[in-house]
Image (cartoon, coloured by chain):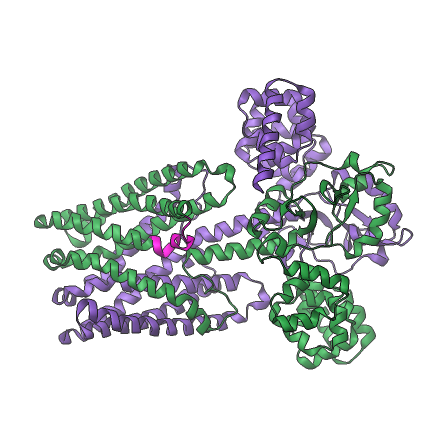
Chain colours: A green, B purple
Amino acid sequence: MVKFEQFIREHYATEVLNHLKNRDKEQFRELFLDLHRTNQMDIFIQLNQQLRSQLYSMVSGNEFADVFEGLDLAKQKQVIQELDERYIAAIFNTISTDEIADFLAELDPSEANKILNTIDNKRAIVIRELLSYPIETAGGIMAKEFVAVKATDKVSEVIDNLRFSAPNAETIYYLYVLDTEACLVGVLSLRDLIIAPAFETIEHIMSTDVISVTTEMDQEDVAKIMQKYDFLAMPVVTKKNVLTGIITIDDVMDIMEDEMSEDFDEFIGAKGGTDLNISSFEAAKKRAPWIVLLAFTGLLTGGIIDFFEAALEEVVLLAVFIPLIMDSAGNAGTQSLAVIVRAMATGSSEKKSIWQTIKREFGTGLILGVIVAIVLLILVPIVYGSFILALIVAASLFITLSFSTIFGGLVPIVINKLKLDPAIASGPFITTVNDVLGLFVYFTIASTFISYL
Amino acid sequence: MVKFEQFIREHYATEVLNHLKNRDKEQFRELFLDLHRTNQMDIFIQLNQQLRSQLYSMVSGNEFADVFEGLDLAKQKQVIQELDERYIAAIFNTISTDEIADFLAELDPSEANKILNTIDNKRAIVIRELLSYPIETAGGIMAKEFVAVKATDKVSEVIDNLRFSAPNAETIYYLYVLDTEACLVGVLSLRDLIIAPAFETIEHIMSTDVISVTTEMDQEDVAKIMQKYDFLAMPVVTKKNVLTGIITIDDVMDIMEDEMSEDFDEFIGAKGGTDLNISSFEAAKKRAPWIVLLAFTGLLTGGIIDFFEAALEEVVLLAVFIPLIMDSAGNAGTQSLAVIVRAMATGSSEKKSIWQTIKREFGTGLILGVIVAIVLLILVPIVYGSFILALIVAASLFITLSFSTIFGGLVPIVINKLKLDPAIASGPFITTVNDVLGLFVYFTIASTFISYL
């Protein structure tokens, strides 16, 4: 935000806080309740326990529900401990059922049940249904509060009815058209509805090309489809095409970010270990298997050097180029890996181009190899005074760069085909493979021409 | 999508294609125009030139505009070459001005001007304004078609007026309230409007806590704010708070993805070189500076080994552990780098926790160091028969792992403070620093205790 606006906002927040501290209920409510819920939340998380209970006494459970919904899980759990049963009931009878399900899924079953018992029966049934779907599927992230209409409804009727259904719906910007069996047969946006003449029937303005997902679809696939179609919300249907929920764009944006972080973690070989909210010990526990595995593979790579010990004993200077070979091989491979993983992540329509991409990467590797070889043929004689050594190093690096791009590209594809753990396609693994390859090529060439050194 | 649905979709696409090939204008139009624009596009990109001109003759420029908007830049340029001026004019007088500006910004000025001359004068002025903002700023990505109302307007009036303004607006789901100077003073959602009683005035239902951005804000910051507030659209104002445009969520989702790809590219040191749509040569050109730089740093790292050549000459076996030291140092550093970069990317409210995160990373490094040291103290004597060697390697790795987490964490922070090129904080750079550090520690310890080997 702009500096000036930031200043105003902080000034405002200070005023809100002062009213809270001075117990000026009227003024506090007037200022606080006019804030966007995200700004209310920013103020709330700064409060100590005393000021929090002061706040609970000044705003009702219904009014606080919005703030509660935006808090992270740890804070939500803390808040629940501080509230009495009636206040909790008021919160949970206000916020949307999918948010409640997400929250309850993280609690002990007994605690979850205690809260479920404070919730209206009708809502509790919906929440239990949501809890029955596996997490990270469409069913697990959908909301049940959608707006459904009939194909024979009139535009004016639907607009009138919206006044009543809108306050509780997750979104009113798409209306879903159901037949008598509750099957999804059409969709229209609120914009279509607003533009249409009042006397028109829904079936004449709805679109019948309805894009929907089923409850069991993986959330990452849901996110991809929503992004492909630029939807603000996506209908979720059962296998029999009965509309059962909707997923809105705000949930999908969070998923996109989480999934990218996950991919990224996998790529650097730190699955779950880069979470900001865990302790040193937990982070170490998650990363240790990887680091130990890397220590093993490091020893394995060292085995190559051990194998060529005779050559190394003869010309110790050969060891100087080990880092060069390893760095270049590892990096070129990782770049190709990144390219192919991304190519595979984009929609199926582009899948045919994966082989083209590998060919592209190999071409890139060849060109990079030539460039680096030339640089080395100039540099190495200057620094180490040997043109033969320069030839050995340059040839090794040329071969290594060309082939490490192929390895970086092929490994994720093979893993995908064989349905192995995709973590094997992580950066550290590719780097190890290419290190071994690079050092083997280098020492083979070096020991062949060692008599000329 | 579900397999079954996929099948239906392909079947439908085949039918659409057949009608196109057989020149059944009526049937083709009926099927094609009922499709979602993304599905129309999927069909269109499969067509050869002959079928494309067949399609142009069957659907009007207005009808084709939606498809055109969804195509990528290369395809759009190709299509423009195939169309006559009137058809082009029809397209550009239909699609939204921000899309046109994005397209024209990629053309030669003369070509852009030729197209601008076919566009209605009023729209052309708007497009010229949009083209005047730097790309990747709020001004560069915003649309000019927003719905503005007055605080004194009645709810029923506004709903009636929406019928006329809705077809051209970028979104109608937020209405912006302006004062007599066109300054932004309030906002309400279409949902608020629908729920409100018909006779209510806007000022009683609008929110005055308006979150807006100014035209010069970086697009990545805009995306963060929209995500923080879960907005579907964001108002853009001038420095004097005059409303001048809006940014919608679909644009922001694309930006989020692009920016993450950019960060990722930077992280693996391949800025722009992992683009799928460029040739081997172009990819090599973009990556070559990095690979050459890495070759240099690899030689630099090799210099450490050269420096300790005497020790190596005495005990060649020491070379065997070079890969182990390098791999472990590089990987631990990269993981910490990823953690800190992510901590810095999250909102400013969490900025105070960055130092805590570095402390966390150091703690993690210590624990990982202890674990790996123990593993090596067991493994190395078994494989290489020397407990002293095991002690040297284990001690080196313990020190290296502890400190490489600190380097990985500190480098991006220092770079940020000194406003240097953040690319220095990329994985390859951190890896090099940690390689040098690790090898230096290892050989120093090794040459100190070499007499015991």
Question: What is the quadrant of residue A126 in the picture?
Answer: bottom right
**Which quarter of the rendered picture does the N terminus of chain B lie within?**
top right
Please determine whether, in this image, residue B62 is positioned above or below residue A370: above
Is residue A54 in view from this perspective? yes
Q: Main secondary structure of the magenta part?
A: helix
Residue found 21% across the figure and 44% down from its top: A395
Residue found 71% across the figure and 73% down from its top: A14
Q: Is residue B147 left or right of residue A392?
A: right
Residue found 33% across the figure and 62% down from its top: A294
Please determine whether, in this image, residue A182 is positioned above or below residue A316: above
Please determine whether, in this image, residue B348 is positioned above or below residue B236: below
User: Is A237 in the magenta?
Assistant: no
Is residue B139 in view from this perspective? no
Residue found 74% across the figure and 62% down from its top: A123
**Which quarter of the rendered picture does the C terminus of chain B lie within?**
bottom left
Q: Position of residue A155 (x, y in %)?
A: 84, 40
Q: Position of residue A203 (x, y in %)?
A: 78, 36
Please determine whether, in this image, residue B253 is positioned above or below residue B386: above
Q: Which residues are magenta?
A: A419-430
Q: Position of residue A206 (x, y in %)?
A: 75, 37
